[in-house]
Image (cartoon, rainbow, N blue to C red):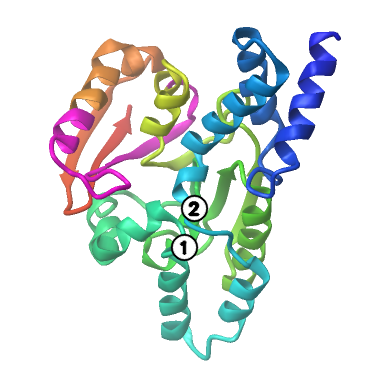
Amino acid sequence: MSQNLLLEDLVTAVTQSPKYRTIAPDLIRRIGTAELAKRGSLKEAVKGTKNKLHQVGGAYWDTAVDYPKALTRLQNAANEETRRQTCRNLMRLHASTRERLPILDEFYATTLAGLPPIHSVVDVACGLNPLAIPWMPLAADVVYHAYDIYGDMLVFLQAYFGLVGVNGRIHHQDILSQPPAEPADLALILKTLPCLEQAEKGAAARLLGSIQARHLLISYPAHSLGGRGKGMVENYEAQFWGLVNDGAAAASGRSWHITRFEFATELAFLVTIS
């Protein structure tokens, strides 16, 4: 059987699982191609592809989300404060945004405080992070680009954008094979680089070199998904400065000005490019 036919069989096998059914096909194909090249059988390649997809995204979901029900909860919010609380509750459904909830009131207010008006945002591997828009100091006419690999979640976020009056645009794609192309005032790259690097060595530098934004807010978790925090901040800080010193800044052809922020659950760096 040809490699192309094997790859299509792999994609079919992976997407038969409810856990992976709505993942961007281009990501499954990219990972599947690499797995087929190094595995002895289609069955082993399917298993290896699922393991990589779990590392990239699946590990952050404790359970399947009922998106129609979530949207109904937002639509039924009686006022702005109730909607904000509903957003907080929904952000608990994804591990990354759940970890940010204890610092949500200060995270964006602190990291983005010194920036000029933000009229455009690229949110890379966004998860449920767009639900935090009410906490972000964005211009009223902001254009918000949400990138992720989960199609059902993005459909929900598009409806959410309409509900809250934000000019939001969803992008269902693999950000390494097809990185964001829009110029933006701000790119949010929140707890994304470690996942990419774990799945594919060198992926973090490739992504940073492709983003077309004036400011980058890059963050790392202060604890593992299991709650262990010993040495995490130090290790991730070393990873970040390694990216900077090994050429991510030079590759952009411009100067990077970096401000560091440390919160209880997250380490963040605001990069301003000039």
The amino acid type of the residue labelled 2 equals Trp
Q: Residues within 10 Å of mark 2 (few under 14, many from 20)?
A: some
Q: Amino acid at mark 1?
A: Leu
What residue does disc 1 label? 93
Between the residue at mark 1 and the residue at mark 2, the CA separation in whole angstroms equals 7 Å
Residue 40 higher or lower than 241, as above or below: above
Where residue 64 sits in the image (x, y, percent)? 58, 59
SS state under label 2: loop
Residue contact between numbered discs 1 and 2, judged by CB atoms under 8 Å: yes
Q: Which residues are magenta?
A: 209-237
**Where in the figure is residue 185, as x and y percent of width and height?**
44, 42
Q: Earlier in the sequence, mark 1 or mark 2?
A: 2
Q: Is residue 23 magenta?
A: no
Provide residue 157's location: percent of width, then percent of height: 61, 60
> Is residue 95 left or right of 71 when viewed as pictured?
left
The magenta stretch spans residue 215: yes
Q: Position of residue 116 (x, y in %)?
A: 34, 50
Residue 101 tag number: none
| Few, some or many residues within 10 Å of mark 1 (<14, 14–19, 20+) | some
Which quarter shows the N terminus?
top right
Report the residue at 23% width, 31% height from top.
Answer: 236
Q: Secondary structure at mark 1?
A: loop
Q: Using the rendered image of the protein, determine whether residue 57 is visible from the camera's viewpoint.
A: yes
- Left or right for 134, reference 154: left
The residue where tag 2 is placed is 61
Q: Is residue 30 above or below residue 78?
A: above
Please say if 37 is above or below 230: above
Q: How many marks?
A: 2
